[in-house]
Amino acid sequence: MSFRDGSPVRVEVGAIEAALEELWATDAQQDEPVVRARAATLIFCTRGRREAGAVWPPPPGSLAGLQGTIDQVMRRYPGRVIGLFLGEEAHGPLEAWVSARCHLGLGGHVCGEQVTVAGSGDVTALAGLVAALRPPDLPTFLWWDAPLTRGHDLLHALADKAHEVIVDSGRPDATPGALAHVSALIRQMKEATVSDLSWARAAPWRELVAQFFDPEAATPVLASLDAADLVYRGATGWACAVLLAGWLAAQLRWEPAGSPPGHAPGEAAARRADGAPVRLQLVPGGDGPDGIHAVRLTAGRDAAFAVEFEPATGCAALTTRLPGRGARHRAVSLTPPTEGDLLCAQLAAAARDRIFESAVEAARGLEIPPPG
Amino acid sequence: MNPLREGLQSEPLPDPCAVVIFGGSGDLAHRKLIPALYQLACRRRLPAQFAVVGYARTKMTTAAFRETVRMGLKLDRNSPLWRSFSEALHYCAGPYDRPDGFRKLDRLLKRLQEARGAGRNQVFYLATPPESAGPIAEQVAGLRRRAIWGGDGWSRLVVEKPFGHDRASAEALDRTLAASFREEQIYRIDHYLGKDTVQNILVFRFANGIFEPLWNRRYVDHVQIAVAESLGVEGRGAYYEGAGALRDMIQNHLMQLLCLVAMEPPVARDERSIRNEKHKVLQAVRPIPRDAVCRSAARGQYGPGAIGGVAVPGYRQEERVNPASATDTYAALRLEIDNWRWAGVPFYLRSGKRLPKRVSEISVQFKLAPHPLFADDPGSDLEPNVLALRIQPDEGIRLTFGAKTPGTGTVIRPVSMEFRYGTAFGTEVPEAYERLLLDCMRGDASLFARSDWVAKAWEIVTPVLEAWQSETPEEFPNYAAGSWGPESARRLIEADGRRWRAL
């Protein structure tokens, strides 16, 4: 068994770099050399993630889903991953492991490395440890895989010198107030950009909705939209739907008209630029995975646009109806992205997204009542 | 402007349009063009108002055409993606040179406009033999003028290489096309330009500050551009007999690569600025006088040999090839660019069939250090630095430099620093035709050749073509399939004290 096989090796917390160098040096004596590649650094901090049968803190690799996500990102962006698995106690011993993360690329094995630190520790100690382990001169991404309601000190400390902070307002354990925390984070971060995996989940939906209005004949209909129905499933779907509603409001300059008493969860009212009312409705529904299942827009009786996800086929059915024309249909591929796909998309984008920030603020302004 | 488009990473969709593929029953349509369009449709890159019309002389129904496409794409007929795409596919049989077929086409486009909103804007793709280009262009122009349903909208004509047979025929083709289309409507496709790795040449040169100061005659010794194929003519002997390596590869693909390597930074990223700079490179290429062809060019033809351990016949034994053929399956050129940046730096271009492996590469070889500090150290291997841009396969960039080997002495060996697309980004490189078709539909001609560039490229190779045509190559075949080409090519570069890179 050699280091490149990926098995975690327990090391002293204070001697992680030295241990890594020694392990690689030993591995280098193998007949077949590997390519140690570094394109980016990913720091992830996870707290509260549970997988069936897992103990906490989990030994490296025991959270197969999470490790699969990390490995997917490493294949696109090989480098060093620093993972913090935080326990619940205020202080406790830290344990560390290192492992090679190799995949078979052109010309042989392409390897990054993963440093896993598990346990509890004060913010200063953890942040200092990460700062020492972070390679210089490479973009650093911090993935906060934990609820946004706690641990902000650590998040801010880890975000120092990070290029981007990635959160997820659509985590299965997210509270309805998660978007407010995202908004606060955007304001607080001085240098790092903030991105939200829920926004990345919404990207293909935004693209498909935008496409409806690319043709010259359809663009003017945007000003006449008077209803938007978003069908979602689960907390992940809710967060995505809220951001989509905020995106429509921000880009189309809809002003919130408040949610009067008696409005059901998911309902909100807005006003178009011309003062006419717009009805927004987020409706639970759909079979299959959590996420968005349909977006339906109407402009009076004459124009309608719909994207309907079909989980069984991984396709979306698109329907356009414009005044004086029959309905047009087409199907496109719409495979729900994996967590790794979403992270890779964020690493690829890596720039401040003002459209996202506008959507967050507009979504908060709509004050859409969450489901009970 | 669609406000929902703001901030999206994907480009806007092209206008609703119909892509009419002349040669719609042929190999290019089914192997490259229609699969590229299918991928674009699946990946949400095409508008709902979109149609593909295959037009050819072969009689076929639309249903049969769709079924042929489906089988070629190996799709389940019940797949929703296939069902959606197939509704956009149509077929029209007719001649290329008579109006009756084009009247049928016109009626079909009208129906497509009514049914799908896809007939008004048109891309006419000439996937046909070169001699059909002129007649088709005339008929298409007539169709547009007569459009029975009064269709307006834009139309674009995509022409595949070769653009003519020589300078005179290229200019004649241009005049024929110009009689029916404006230059900005004509898209001369060179699929090499659609490759991510070729586009990366401009990014590499002009998005990084460290290489451009070295990219000139002070530091560069010479540049080699190689496009090697291991395949033979693969049943296209009839076409290749009239083409040869110089026409088929060097006049277009390699000249494009030469321009990307040698051009000045454009003032902007628009198509006009980029194409202007590429044209300036060709304008600066020193003409090859007729009596200098033997010193500036080498040709070859493969004989029997072996590729990958498997015996293969020689070119003259290939199907539909003249047993006494004088066609070059290998060509090499030595060019000089007379401008401030490149004066005195030779550019060596080579391309051939039935070489040991398929590889396309640009290598920039730098001059040795001016003062050889380590020349006397025993065992030191002082090689010049080489920057190699690998176009295919194994796409990437490699920089070779000398490093001291561990130990008490100073022994220097070459080492490589390498970026590989597949390793660094871990994603598949998109198909070139997808990019080019989408750009044409969107009206972006940056990656297409302009008429003046084509004319200039012909002007450069014409003396070589004329010299070769006037002299029978008694030595053909002069390299074995599976070898790296003829001796004459080796002598061409070694006369300058240099040698071909091992690929």
Image (cartoon, rainbow, N blue to C red):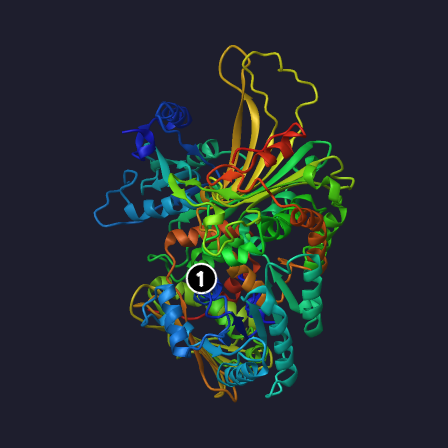
Q: Residues within 10 Å of mark 1 (few under 14, many from 20)?
A: few
| Residue A6 coordinates in the image, percent (x, y) | 32, 35
The quarter of the rendered structure image containing the C terminus of chain A is bottom left
The residue furthest left is A53
Q: Chain of mark 1?
A: B
Q: Which residue is mark 1?
A: B31
Q: Please determine whether, in this image, residue B31 is positioned above or below residue A140.
A: below
Question: In the rendered structure, which amino acid carries the disc numbered 1?
Answer: Arg
With A340 as the anchor, is B246 left or right in this view? Answer: right
**What residue is shown at x 56% (from left), y 52% (from top)?**
A351
**Can I make out residue B307 in this image?**
yes
**Can I make out residue A282 in this image?**
no
| Residue B61 coordinates in the image, percent (x, y) | 41, 79
Q: Nearer the viewer, residue B471 or B355?
A: B471
The quarter of the rendered structure image containing the N terminus of chain A is top left
Quadrant of the image occupied by residue B487: top right
**What residue is shown at x 38% (from left), y 76% (from top)?**
B64
| Residue B444 coordinates in the image, percent (x, y) | 63, 63
Quadrant of the image occupied by residue B140: bottom right
Q: How many marks?
A: 1
With B299 as the anchor, is B455 left or right in this view? Answer: right
Q: Please determine whether, in this image, residue A9 is positioned above or below residue A362.
A: above
Q: Nearer the viewer, residue A288 or A185?
A: A288
| Residue B132 coordinates in the image, percent (x, y) | 59, 69
**What residue is shown at x 51% (from left), y 58% (from top)?**
B238
Q: Nearer the viewer, residue A179 or B486?
A: B486
Q: Secondary structure at mark 1?
A: helix
Q: Nearer the viewer, residue A59 or A128?
A: A59
Q: Please determine whether, in this image, residue A60 is positioned above or below residue B40.
A: above
